[in-house]
Structures are given as C-alpha cells and as structure tokens.
Amino acid sequence: MFNKILVVCVGNVCRSPTAERLLKRFHPSLTVASAGLGALVGKGADPAAASVASAHDLSLENHCARQISARLCREYDLILTMEKRHIAALCDIVPEMRGKVMLFGHWDSEREIPDPYRKSRDAFEAVYTLLERSARQWAQALNAEQGKP
C-alpha cells in the first residue's frame, strides 16, 4: 500500500509542486511531498505555475524547492517522476528504489509530462491539464487499491 508519495521533477518549482498539491486535493489521506533532481533549493513555486494553479483554485503558496537525496527517497513508498530519464537518474542515486519509481503519467499511457519552465502561459496550462488528469488517475488507482470506490 502506498501511503507516502514523493513527486519528482527537475527544479521542483513547476511540475512536481503542482502535482503534489493535486494529489493531496484528490486523495487527502495521503502524505505527499515533492523534490527536484536539480532543485532550485529554497525557491518558491514558479510564478507562472502558481498563477495557472491559482486559476484552477489550487494554491502553491508556501512551497519551498528541495533537492532529492537517497535519504529522502527512502522515506517514501512510491516516487512519481515526470519523465523516463528521471526514473533512470533516481535509480542511479538509490538503486533499491527501482521497483518504487514510476511515471506520474503512468495511467495516461505512460505519458511523460514536459517541463514548462520559462515557456508560455499556454505551455503551463497544457502541463496543468496533464498533471490534473494524471493526479485524478493516481487517486482512482490508489482508492481501488485500498478498496474504496
């Protein structure tokens, strides 16, 4: 059973904080956090990501980017990444996590979620749509695992 989930992207300022908050919205009983492979440590959410999230009634307030580490990975039951290359990078850092690392877009035909950093608002909107859909799909799968409708 997956009760503690870590969501990972590169900078931990766009995709993973949004995905973290969406998973918490759709499955409030989970412990969810986020981190980055090349985190902009100490930074808040990207202003464009925060603006798009806010337009969808999702707050990224008080987010603080942090760097992934082997110790952090070991604290979680499941690690969700945005891209396949992130899976490979995580497995290099913590080889024993190999079976616990999956794509955030796993239930959406193994879709990778592109990085909108420094791109247009339309790019952030498109990524938000993908993140929201995948978060809903993860919540449904986790509810089914726990025997909930």
Image: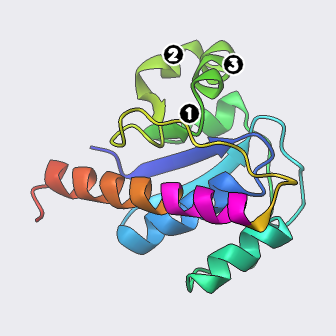
* 47 w.r.t. 76: above or below: below
- Verify whether residue 127 appears in magenta: yes
Can residue 97 be found in the magenta stretch? no
| SS at circle 2 | helix
Task: Residue at 83% x, 55% y: name it.
Answer: 119
- Residue designated by label 3: 93
Residue at mark 1: 74
Q: Can you identify the residue that label 2 sits on?
A: 96
Q: Which secondary structure lies at badge 1?
A: helix
- Specify few, some or many for label 2: CA neighbours under 10 Å numbering under 14, 14-19, or 20 or more: few
Q: Give, as a three-letter code, the residue at label 3.
A: Ile
Q: Please tell me which residue is depicted at 17% across the width and 48% down the height of the picture.
A: 145
Numbered range of the magenta stretch: 122-130
User: What type is the residue that disc 2 sits on?
Assistant: Glu
What's the distance in space between the residues labelled 1 and 3, CA to CA?
11 Å
Are dots 1 and 3 in contact, CB under 8 Å? no
